[in-house]
Amino acid sequence: MSAIFVDEAIEQLRAGFRGELIDPGSPEYDDARKIYNGMIDRRPALIARCADAGDVIAAVNYARDNGVPLAVRGGGHHGAGLSVVDDGLVIDLSLMKGVRVDPEARTALVMGGSTWGEVDHATHAFGLATPSGIISTTGVGGLTLGGGVGHLTRGFGLALDNLLSADMVLADGSFVTVSEESHPDLFWAIRGGGGNFGVVTAFQFRLHPVHTVYAGPMFWDVAQATEIMRWYRDFLPAQGDELGGFFGFHIVPSTAPFPEEIWGKHVAIVVWTYTGPMEQAEAVFAPIRQQFGTPLLDWVGPIPQPALNSMFDGLYPPGDQWYWKADFFNELTDEAIARNVEFGSNIPTWQSLTHFYPIDGAASRVANDATAWKWRDAKWCQVIVGVSKDPADKELITNWARDYWEAVHPFSAGGAYVNMMMEEGQERVMASYGDNYDRLAEIKAKYDPGNLFHLNQNIRPRA
Ligand SMILES: Cc1cc2nc3c(=O)[nH]c(=O)nc-3n(C[C@H](O)[C@H](O)[C@H](O)COP(=O)(O)OP(=O)(O)OC[C@H]3O[C@@H](n4cnc5c(N)ncnc54)[C@H](O)[C@@H]3O)c2cc1C
């Protein structure tokens, strides 16, 4: 491809573009190329901040016709930095925000560059919510297309289980709305298949009557971790869908509002979410509160759903160093718990963590092949995350996460979660999809035979 042709093509793109085109000469370039994970430092040739689907179509056509490597950025939160590419084009959806709630139909139309905090705010006004994750700055795009496990998963399924339709720009530049009725193969594939199939410019979600929940974190001394984790393993799966809660290991941040006497302490935690009748909540939690004596910290109580979803945002601002690995577990044996307690009690930095997100309840009542996301039989999704503000800790947090993962992986169900892994090779991508991979590869060959959308956990088009 001659440089002159590419220059001419850029001028053509610029002439019809309504959003912002940012190149290395633009004053905002260095800010625009930053993503959430401070470990990632890439220099795209052009960042196309699209204003609408028309801009997205123009940018997709430009990348395809000129052989330019293409990345698509939703909220920019993927740990592996999949939303930014060296010497290529980034389609940045961050200007494409907006949420329209239909309170009668209980649906929300969400623009492709929105974050979950924006969705929560808009739906909460109507006493409604849809499942997402546990941090509100995360992008709707990547989280939904890859799965979406969080506070409301036991009650209402994964984020993608609540997707009703999506507007998409495909690799050939065409625009389609996909749903169970329209392009059902593509609708099946995008529910788990990540950004492999096109750029989603708008999502339509089902909403649920969730307003104030009874929720929040409970901390215990890590010395009690074995008995708490064993109890949690047996207790939660026996509860109804209205009770959720993820287990984790943390270090208490040395800052307000945490009580000073527990700053820096290693703790085992559960962050609970109860969506049942508020008047029954105290009774539900009374035995939990007595189970192991008074917890070190008990912030469980009535809280608006958006406040729960953004409760930890301040502890995890953009720009920190992140390295993560994940697995699914069908069961947590005593031996697996012992390995977790060993590594979980030795977290290297105060922001590092491991969490076990429950994926039973509503998420488990969907067939493994009903969407591309196949881990419906598993009970837990574990993520191990090394985080630090200090780039000098890169090796420390990476090695801890890798060693921890090596120690517990033999107990796992064998698969990976595309939203919580680095670039770990094709074998891990295939493990994420298991039996669903072949069908995904066929659909990829139909809609993106040239693999234009390859900066993701990549599904290769079937030859
Ligand atoms: C602080 C933090 C908290 C998290 N918490 C949770 C959690 O509770 N539960 C959970 O399941 N996950 C969680 N995650 C993981 C999260 O799901 C992934 O990082 C996800 O990729 C984020 O989506 P994004 O749009 O911000 O990412 P990006 O990095 O922008 O995109 C990730 C991938 O999705 C593609 N993509 C994004 N938007 C679109 C779109 N509109 N159309 C087509 N492709 C698109 C990108 O091309 C890229 O391949 C968390 C991540 C972080 C950093």
Image (tube, rainbow, N blue to C red):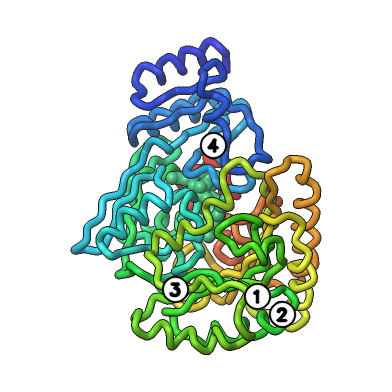
Q: Position of residue 295 (x, y in %)?
A: 61, 78
Q: Nearer the viewer, mark 4 or mark 1?
A: 1
Q: Which mark is residue 460?
A: none
The residue at the point 71 percent across, 77 percent down is 225
Q: Amino acid at mark 2?
A: Gln
Tell me if residue 245 can be seen: yes
Whichever of labels 4 and 3 marks the residue nearer the N terminus, that label is 4
Q: Earlier in the sequence, mark 1 or mark 3?
A: 1
Is residue 189 visible to us here?
Answer: no
Q: Nearer the viewer, residue 295 or 134?
A: 295
Local crowd size for mark 1, using a 10 Å CA cut-off: few (<14), some (14–19), many (≥20): many
Q: Position of residue 388 (x, y in %)?
A: 69, 48
Rounded to the nearest angstrom, the CA distance separating label 3 from label 2 is 23 Å
- Residues at marks 2 and 1, CA–CA distance in whole angstroms: 7 Å
Helix, strand or loop at label 4? It is strand
Label 2 neighbourhood size at 10 Å, few (<14), some (14-19), many (20+)?
few
Q: Quadrant of residue 303?
A: bottom left
Tell whether circle 4 marks a residue whose Cβ is less than 8 angstroms from ligand 1.
yes
Residue at x 43% of width, y 38% of height: 94
Q: Mark 2 highlights which residue? A: 224
Distance of mark 4 from mark 3, alpha carbons?
42 Å
- Looking at marks 2 and 4 on the same chain, the residue that comes earlier in the sequence is marked by 4
> Closer to the camera: disc 2 or disc 4?
2
The earlier-in-sequence mark between 3 and 2 is 2
Q: Is residue 252 above or below residue 214?
A: above
The residue under label 1 is: 220
- From the image, tell me which residue sits under label 4: 71
Residue under numbered circle 3: 301
**Amino acid type of the residue tagged 4 in the rendering:** Ala
Q: Closest to the observer: 198 or 206?
A: 206
Percent position of residue 352, x then y: 69, 57
- Say which element carries label 3: strand
